[in-house]
Image (cartoon, rainbow, N blue to C red):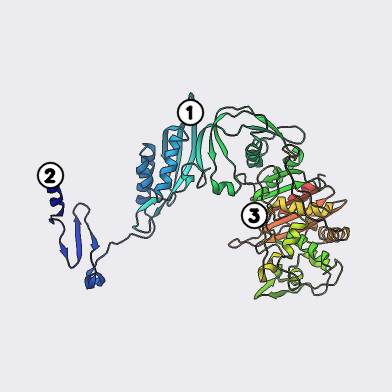
């Protein structure tokens, strides 16, 4: 009986009046009306008689930013996860990570203190306690959030990303406290000295990579720690798990690397003179990596960067041209001011040209069209095959001991194929790749670079399917020596002695005022390459960094 009464009461219409197919709800306290259309017909199609809810747009006010950020931070601090997540634009992802903050990361006594907003961005500080079993340690760090307006209704919400919870988190990463799955490692240089991020600032990502790969086999014992556990996207990007707080020390195993303390210290000093600079030094006869340094320390551009290498790629292109007997260094080969290919018009740097000159002079001056004009004589896959078969690049099979990117030279056609001949288009490299290119020219054969000897874990190093001929090697050394003595690399390489050669590069990047400056060179049994992003011409930016390291040998 009671049940039937309640149903009847719900069906009784005593609420809003239906007028012209429109329900009008007046919320007295709020002072506004909400309208909803019902049915169809003329009334539904007539905009004059069908008012609609106005969605607020435009920049957020200071009050909206303050209210939205306070709602989120207060709910998070008080452990009201659902409410905090609802204050973001991705409640599902926020709920999962904020729940894990307590459940998986074992963080308690959380205090969040908002700082002074800058526009829609609100910085805040975090203090908490990491508590696991009978162990505990304090945790303090700074983070920030950004308030955005939701398009559907104009409501100010926190723009959700995992980095809101902790700045070291990428989307898909998690925070976990417990016995580390991987014991710590004590990394040693080639002379037996300990390598630490405190001593060599660039080595943080390298040390993380060494622990991830060798921690379980190096003889150590795991400790208890709070760490960032990387998700699939971060792993694909080459990022390793990161320790944030160590509650109890594990017993480290030992891993010896090929790094030279002398070269590493010098490389750190050199990249510190410029922003966004990276350099790698290798030994051509063996492939041993002697140094890697980056002026920014969060990501190892030296090993994992994926950047257009610009004209340094002309070393690989020239190898292909020499092997195909399409040109020789001293053959007459003009470099026109412009060259049209598949609807594109290619220009040289500064619209320069070499009307009467040799291929060697074009190589030394880095004149683009002296290379692009060979495109009609080449197959789309020729450059890719050359990079793979002689230089061991672009096959995703290097095993250096830590995460690395092996370069990419995709098969392209038309204008993109032409652009790839000068290190643009889809070609991507990093200083490790280009140092290996110079090393291959110096030694005449590809030796896969490595940071940890393959004898440590009996892994197989990548190999190139063939070596360049002695004639081709001689021709490459000839044009690179000319570039170092008289071309775009001459200023940086001044005073060099012995057997040496170099190549500069400038890679244009969309939206970037200055190009990325590249430089790769060899001297005796040393090879190095560097890049300064948004720095300008390679001879002026990366050149002094690379040359100073080669002069140490």
**Would residue 70 be seen by someone viewing this image from the given angle?**
no
Please identify, in this view, whether the residue under mark 2 or under mark 1 is nearer the observer.
2
**How many angstroms separate mark 3 from mark 2 (CA)?**
71 Å
Residue 6, horizontal then vertical, whole percent: 14, 48
Neighbourhood count class around disc 3 (C-alpha, 10 Å): few under 14, some 14–19, many 20 upward: some
Q: Secondary structure at mark 2?
A: helix
Name the residue that disc number 3 marks: 306
Q: Residue furthest top?
A: 134
Residue highlighted by disc 1: 132
The reply, left or right, for residue 524 in relation to residue 374 is right
Q: Are marks 3 and 1 in contact (CB under 8 Å)?
A: no
Q: Please determine whether, in this image, residue 84 is positioned above or below residue 507.
A: above
Residue 340 percent across, percent down from the top left: 69, 76
**Occupied quadrant, residue 416:** bottom right
Secondary structure state at the residue bearing disc 3: loop
Q: Label 1 crowding class (10 Å Cα cut-off): few <14, some 14-19, many 20+? A: some
Which residue sits furthest front?
1
Which of the labelled discs sits on residue 2, or is there none?
2
Image position of 543 with respect to 125: above or below: below
Foreground tag (3 vs 2): 2
Between residue 8 and residue 141, name the one nearer to us: 8
Q: Earlier in the sequence, mark 3 or mark 1?
A: 1
* Percent coordinates x, y for residue 69 in the rendering: 38, 46
Q: Which mark is residue 414?
A: none
């Amino acid at each position: 009986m009671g049940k039937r009464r309640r149903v009847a009461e719900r069906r009784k219409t005593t609420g809003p009046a239906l007028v012209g197919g429109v329900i009008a709800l007046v919320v007295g306290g709020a002072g506004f009306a909400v309208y909803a259309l019902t049915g169809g017909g003329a009334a539904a199609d007539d905009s004059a008689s069908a008012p609609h809810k106005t969605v607020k747009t435009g920049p957020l006010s200071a009050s909206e930013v303050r209210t939205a950020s306070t709602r989120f931070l207060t709910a998070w601090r008080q452990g009201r996860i659902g409410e905090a997540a609802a204050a973001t634009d991705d409640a599902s992802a926020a709920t999962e990570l904020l729940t894990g903050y307590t459940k998986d990361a074992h963080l308690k006594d959380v205090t969040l203190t908002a700082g002074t907003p800058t526009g829609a961005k609100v910085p805040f500080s975090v203090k908490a306690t990491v508590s696991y079993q009978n162990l505990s340690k304090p945790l303090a760090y700074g983070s920030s959030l950004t308030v955005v307006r939701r398009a559907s209704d104009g409501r100010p919400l926190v723009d959700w990303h995992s980095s809101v919870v902790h700045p070291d988190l990428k989307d898909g990463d998690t925070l976990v406290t417990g016995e580390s799955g991987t014991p710590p490692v004590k990394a040693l240089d080639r002379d037996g000295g300990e390598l630490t991020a405190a001593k060599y600032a660039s080595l943080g990502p390298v040390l993380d990579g060494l622990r991830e790969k060798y921690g379980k086999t190096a003889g150590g014992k795991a400790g208890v720690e709070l760490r960032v556990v990387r998700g699939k996207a971060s792993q694909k990007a080459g990022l390793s798990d990161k320790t944030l707080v160590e509650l109890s020390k594990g017993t480290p195993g030992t891993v010896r690397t090929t790094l030279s303390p002398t070269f590493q210290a010098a490389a750190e000093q050199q990249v510190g003179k410029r922003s966004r600079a990276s350099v790698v030094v290798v030994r051509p006869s063996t492939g041993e990596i002697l140094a890697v340094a980056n002026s920014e320390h969060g990501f190892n551009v030296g090993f994992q960067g994926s950047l257009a290498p610009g004209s340094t790629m002309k070393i690989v292109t020239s190898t292909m041209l020499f092997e195909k007997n399409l040109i020789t260094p001293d053959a007459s080969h003009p470099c026109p001011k412009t060259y049209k290919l598949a609807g594109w018009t290619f220009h040289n740097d500064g619209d320069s040209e070499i009307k009467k000159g040799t291929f060697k002079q074009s190589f030394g001056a880095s004149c683009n069209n002296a290379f692009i004009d060979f495109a009609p004589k080449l197959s789309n896959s020729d450059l890719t095959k050359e990079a793979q078969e002689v230089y061991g690049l672009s096959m995703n099979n290097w095993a250096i001991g830590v995460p690395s990117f092996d370069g990419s030279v995709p098969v392209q056609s038309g204008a993109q194929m032409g652009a790839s001949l000068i290190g643009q288009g889809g070609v991507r490299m990093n200083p490790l790749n280009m140092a290996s290119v110079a090393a291959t020219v110096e030694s005449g054969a590809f030796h896969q670079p490595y940071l940890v000897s393959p004898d440590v874990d009996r892994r197989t190093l990548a190999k190139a399917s063939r070596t360049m001929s002695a004639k081709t090697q001689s021709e490459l050394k000839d044009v690179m020596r000319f570039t170092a003595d008289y071309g775009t690399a001459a200023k940086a390489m001044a005073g060099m002695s012995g057997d040496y050669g170099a190549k500069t590069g400038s890679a244009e990047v969309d939206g970037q005022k200055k190009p990325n400056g590249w430089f790769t060179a060899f001297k005796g049994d040393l090879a190095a390459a560097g890049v300064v992003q948004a720095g300008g011409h390679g001879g002026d930016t990366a050149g002094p960094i690379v040359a100073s390291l080669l002069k140490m040998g």
